[in-house]
Amino acid sequence: MATVSAAPTPQTSDRAPEPFTDGYHLAVDALLRNDIRTMYGVVGIPITDLARLAQASGIRYIGFRHESDAGHAAAAAGFLTGRPGVCLTVSGPGFLNGLVALANATTNCFPVVQISGSSERGIIDLRRGDYEEIDQLAAARPLVKAAYRVDRAEDIGRGLARAIRTAVSGRPGGVYLDIPAAVLGEVVEAEKGAASLPRVVDPAPRQLPQPGAVDRAIELLAGAERPLVVLGKGAAYARADKRIREFIERTGLPFLPMSMAKGLLPDDHPQSVATARSLALRRADVVMLIGARLNWLLGHGEAPQWNPDVRFVQVDIDPVELDGNRPIDAPLVGDAASVMDVLTERTAPGRITVPKAWRAELAARSAQNVAKMTERIEAAGKAHPMKFLGALRAVRDVLHDHPGAYVVNEGANALDFARNVLDMRVPRHRLDSGTWGIMGIGMGYAIAAAVETGEPVVAVEGDSAFGFSGMEMETACRYGLPVVTVVLNNSGVYRGDDVSTTADPAPTALRAQYHLMMPAFGGVGYRATTPAEVDRALREALASGKPALIDCVIDPTDGTESGHLTNLNPKGVADIARPTS
Ligand code: ADP
């Protein structure tokens, strides 16, 4: 590096400040000024020196193998900390790889800033064919919450401040910050540079609801015969844990957590109706959504999944979300923490009650479903070859002894089964495929959970899902992170018993012994063919605190086409042979 920053950083030496600085130093100083202490990325032209300088200046840089994984890691960091995760990418294709994760984060309402280097503007804009030529700002814009470009080094601080506030305020989301190579290398007077770096004050201010709106919601809930609360990941993100629990316990309202809201109240809480989900949705007459959207994951709030006459209270930070699928009778716009404060304060004791008949109806269905599920899990535990449920029973039992462990979960059947079997007891400890229902988030989320919290992480992965980011186990090993990946390996996408009509494998077929990759990375690999072996391996891996992978050999005939989403496959007229469960 040719120049030295005069802006104060934790690493500032006693040397007299140099009169000049540059874009690299200003970017790092701007990050430090805003307390960004971790960055995820993949280096290359033109940002390698930016990563080096960040690391040397006290920012922890986690270097990945693929930008999407780094982006997913930054997104998970945003969800887990409530502060923007930062992802650093190279220009062109590296930027595009990262953009997938940034768009996914935006869809999930996670705060992230993707900082990317970019090529020569004058050449790109005339389409003259530059190295990695893409108009990155234009490409990012439609897919993210906001996109900004810095065209002068003196604007780096301003650009980052804008990106941070945009990412975390209101509905959180992904922000793209484009810093062309020329701006990183631009030399400016150190004093002027130092003066150009703002610190964002109160980046996500509280948003309180109107008292009248709160009273309207209370009245609706008080008049309900079959009330229900649905908790979404927006409620988890809002860190309103105590207030939500207090409100639910005071009123006695039954609640249903969406997958990433599991643990906000413990899954074994007596008011949880997760085990009577279908009945609760079909019969409830007033539903309070807290940080949950009526999107496809909730059947758009429509019959037959829902009671057609259901009325909604919706707590959301984004007013634009309301009325999108169903009319909202009592909108409560604000951050969930503030809304729940006011709601709890204004609800007189005994004002909201839950009729006995509704409680009894839910309890009866819940008992019935729990008995059925217990029987299925017990039977699966004895089956050989091992079933999904057999392996997951073992994982569940080990996790009961490690309540602080984070759970990452993706796949089709691996996601559906694990969501039901692995109960959560602590808020924000489950990260999964999310709003798009995608695969590829696994190792990025797992690595970020370990980096941000220092706690052990158990990633429960379908074999197909794992393939998208599996190489990042090397990243986990390189940084010595306590990530244990459990691959539920039934040798295929959905299932492993599809038969090909040609000499090539079937489109859904996969073949690998995933544990064999671990020694190459310096980690530990296990192969488990019975639930007892899963139990032993997982306990040992967690006790070691080191990265490990357990390849669980699952019966290739276990699993359903598309998991619970079989109905989303269009049905044509052609006769196509598929395996059935
Ligand atoms: P889930 O998939 O768990 O149902 P969604 O991602 O569909 O959850 O919904 C999350 C909702 O939470 C979004 O509509 C978002 O605007 C909202 N949200 C995000 N942060 C907050 C917050 N702090 N307070 C209230 N709502 C929030």
Image (cartoon, rainbow, N blue to C red):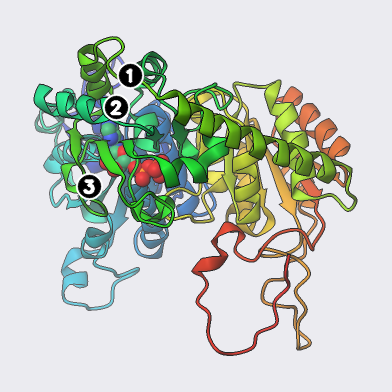
Sequence-first tag of 2 and 1: 1
Q: Which mark is residue 32?
A: 2
CA neighbours of label 3 inside 10 A, class few (<14), some (14 to 19), many (20+): some
In which quarter of the view is residue 378 placed?
top right
Decide: is 472 above or below 29. below
**297 relative to 210, above or below:** below
Mark 3 / mark 2, whichever is N-terminal:
2
C-alpha span from label 2 to label 1: 8 Å
Q: Amino acid at mark 3?
A: Glu
Which residue in the protein does label 3 denote?
321
Asked whether mark 3 and ligand 1 are closer than 8 Å, the reply comes as yes
Residue 39 found in image quarter:
top left
Circle 1: element type: loop
Q: Are marks 3 and 2 in contact (CB under 8 Å)?
A: no
- The secondary structure type at the circle numbered 2 is helix
Q: Does 442 sit left or right of 139 as displayed?
A: right
User: What's the distance in space between the residues labelled 3 and 1, CA to CA?
Assistant: 42 Å
Decide which of 449, 460 is in the foreground and name it: 460
Q: Which image quarter holds the C terminus?
A: bottom right
Query: Callout 2: few (<14), some (14-19), or many (20+) C-alpha neighbours within 10 Å?
Result: many
* Mark 2 C-beta closer than 8 Å to ligand 1: no
Residue 344, percent from left and from top: 27, 15
Q: Residue at x 62, y 21 (%)?
A: 403
Mark earlier in primary sequence (3, 1): 1
Q: Is residue 15 left or right of residue 43?
A: left
The answer, for residue 132, to whether it is visible in the render is yes
Image position, residue 48 (x, y; %): 40, 47
Q: Are marks 2 and 1 in contact (CB under 8 Å)?
A: yes
C-alpha separation, residue under disc 3 versus residue under disc 2: 34 Å
Q: Mark 1 — residue?
A: 10
